[in-house]
Amino acid sequence: MKIMHKQDYITHLGEDCIHNFLTFIFKEVNGKRLGVFDENPSLVTTYTIPEDETDFQDDLNKLLVNLIYLSMKHFGGNLTQIWINGIRDMQLRNKFESFIIKYISPPLITDILNSATNTDSVADDDFSVKLNKSNNEVKCIYEIDEQKLEIGIDLPANYPLSQISVKGLSRIGVDEKKWKSWILACRYVINLQNGTILEAIKHFKSNVQLNFQDYDDCAICYSILNAVDHSTPNKVCTTCKHNFHSACLYRWFKSSGSSTCPLCRAKFQFKKHS
């Protein structure tokens, strides 16, 4: 039996079904009874229908708001943005947006940031994740030879009405084209694949690891990344197979007065690291 993932269920339901459902529950919410959520915001995220007989309309309103929160959480930002942008009645759309920003965005952002703190599956001696809840930002840092590759993931205050942004903060040892592709891949995982921030973080880490896993330390400076130009050891001696940074190798040639390998002393043939 095929196991269905969250995105499979969303695809199976279809955008029209989801959009109609969201519009229906929003229209059913009684705006005059929203004060209870100002007094007790936790009702937005967790609500259980009481067994004893209470105010039916009040309970229904609490249930509907909780359903809106759960829908936004599990359907993801992309579907929410398509739905809200498809509402032609601007008065109705503005009403929905104001409600989401006030009651849904704050707990949803908190929930997403809290889930991003569970980094046991990704954090290690080289890779760390830092959370700044004051500006809704997650930073992912990969350290190589005391130098850093770093990206930032920012949640907008009106999420899920706007996309989560991913930006490059520090690039070393990676060409710009590849770096941009990693950033775009993280954005795609979060905003279009309905993936979590943690999944995007894992994707970024995997790309970094795969990029550097085939490199040995430079046999001159004993580092993967050159301290000056942040390049990788891309020159290989065809005789002893050791790797060297171009800058380190050229300094050796200049200081030694010859173009031989610093280790095996064979005539250096300029073979680029594959």
Image (cartoon, rainbow, N blue to C red):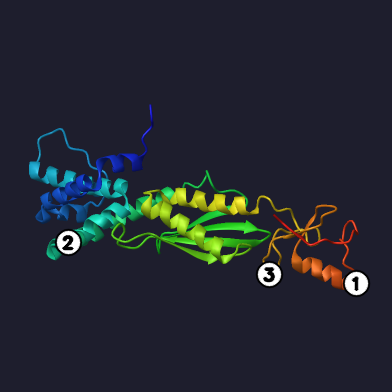
The crowd level at tag 2 (other Cα within 10 Å; few <14, some 14-19, many 20+) is some
Instruction: Residue under label 2, please give it.
Output: 93
Mark number, residue 257? 1
Amino acid type indicated by mark 2: Arg
Q: Is residue 36 left or right of residue 138?
A: left
Could you say which quadrant of the image residue 149 lies in?
Answer: bottom right
* Image quarter hosting the C terminus: bottom right
- Of 54 and 184, which appears nearest the observer? 184
Q: Nearer the viewer, mark 1 or mark 2?
A: 1
The CA span between labels 3 and 2 is: 51 Å
Q: Residue at 51% of width from left, 49% of height from top?
A: 202
Q: Is residue 166 left or right of residue 17?
A: right
Residue 217: percent from left, percent from top? 75, 55
Instruction: Residue under label 3, please give it.
Output: 229
The crowd level at tag 1 (other Cα within 10 Å; few <14, some 14-19, many 20+) is few
* Image quarter hosting the N terminus: top left
Label 1: state its secondary structure.
loop
Residue 57: percent from left, percent from top? 8, 45
Evaluate if marks 3 and 2 touch, with contact meaning CB atoms under 8 Å apart.
Answer: no
Q: Earlier in the sequence, mark 3 or mark 2?
A: 2
